Image (spheres, helix red, strand yellow):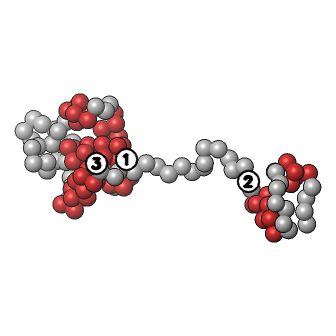
C-alpha cells in the first residue's frame, strides 16, 4: 500500500452504466435531481478519465452537501443505479383519499340512476339503492 487508503465504497461504473448516466445528463428531459445524481456518480467513478474526484470536490462542483455525495455513492454501491438516481416511491399518499370504494360505488349508482346534480353531503344524507 502506498500510504493512500483504498475506499470501501468506491464507485466503479461499467461502460453501459457510464453511457446510461451520460444519456441522462444529455437528454434534458429528466429532473434536476436526477441529472445532478448522474453527474455525481460519473465524477465519483474510480475509473474516471481525469481521476476520481474526492467527495468535497464533487460537492463543491455540484453545489451540494458532502453528505449528499456520500449518501448517493453509498446507495449506488449497496442498492444499484436506480436507487441512487431515482427518488423513493412513497408508501402512503401524503393526504388520505377522500373517496373510498363504498362512496365511489354509491356515486356510480347515482350517476346510473340519472341524478344530474349531487354533492357528497347530499349523497350521504339520502342513500340511493
Q: Which of 126 and 116 is in front in this view?
A: 116
Above or below, 74 against 56 in this view is below
Q: In which quarter of the image is the C terminus?
A: bottom right
Where residue 74 appears, as percent x and y from the top left, is 33, 45
> How far apart are the alpha carbons under marks 1 and 2?
31 Å
Q: Which residue lies furthest to the left in this view?
A: 2
What secondary structure is found at the residue carrying circle 3? Answer: helix
Where residue 122 appears, as percent x and y from the top left, is 87, 51
Task: Determine the image quadrant of residue 82.
Answer: bottom left
Above or below, 61 against 14 in this view is above
User: How many numbered marks appear?
Assistant: 3
The residue labelled by disc 2 is 99
From the viewer's perspective, is the residue at label 3 or at label 2 nearer?
2
Above or below, 115 against 46 in this view is below
In screen coordinates, is 97 left or right of 129? left
Residue at the spot 73% in from the left edge and 53% down from the top edge: 99
What secondary structure is found at the residue carrying circle 1? Answer: loop
Where residue 126 appears, as percent x and y from the top left, is 92, 55
Label 2 Cα crowd, 10 Å radius (few <14 / some 14-19 / many 20+): few
What numbered label is drawn on residue 31?
1
Residue at the spot 26% in from the left edge and 35% down from the top edge: 62
- Whether residue 10 is visible here, answered yes or no, is no
- Whether residue 45 is visible here, answered yes or no, is yes
The residue labelled by disc 3 is 38
Residue at the spot 30% in from the left edge and 38% down from the top edge: 69
Amino acid at each position: 500500500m502506498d500510504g493512500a487508503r483504498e475506499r470501501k465504497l468506491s464507485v466503479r461504473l461499467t461502460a453501459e452504466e457510464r453511457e446510461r448516466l451520460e444519456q441522462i445528463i444529455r437528454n434534458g428531459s429528466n429532473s434536476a435531481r436526477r441529472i445532478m445524481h448522474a453527474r455525481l456518480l460519473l465524477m465519483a467513478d474510480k475509473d474516471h478519465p481525469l481521476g476520481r474526484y474526492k467527495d468535497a470536490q464533487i460537492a463543491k462542483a455540484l453545489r451540494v452537501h458532502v453528505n449528499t455525495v456520500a449518501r448517493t455513492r453509498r446507495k449506488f454501491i449497496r442498492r444499484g443505479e436506480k436507487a441512487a438516481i431515482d427518488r423513493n416511491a412513497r408508501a402512503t399518499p401524503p393526504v388520505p383519499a377522500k373517496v373510498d370504494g363504498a362512496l365511489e360505488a354509491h356515486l356510480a349508482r347515482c350517476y346510473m340512476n340519472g341524478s344530474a346534480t349531487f354533492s357528497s353531503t347530499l349523497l350521504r344524507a339520502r342513500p340511493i339503492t
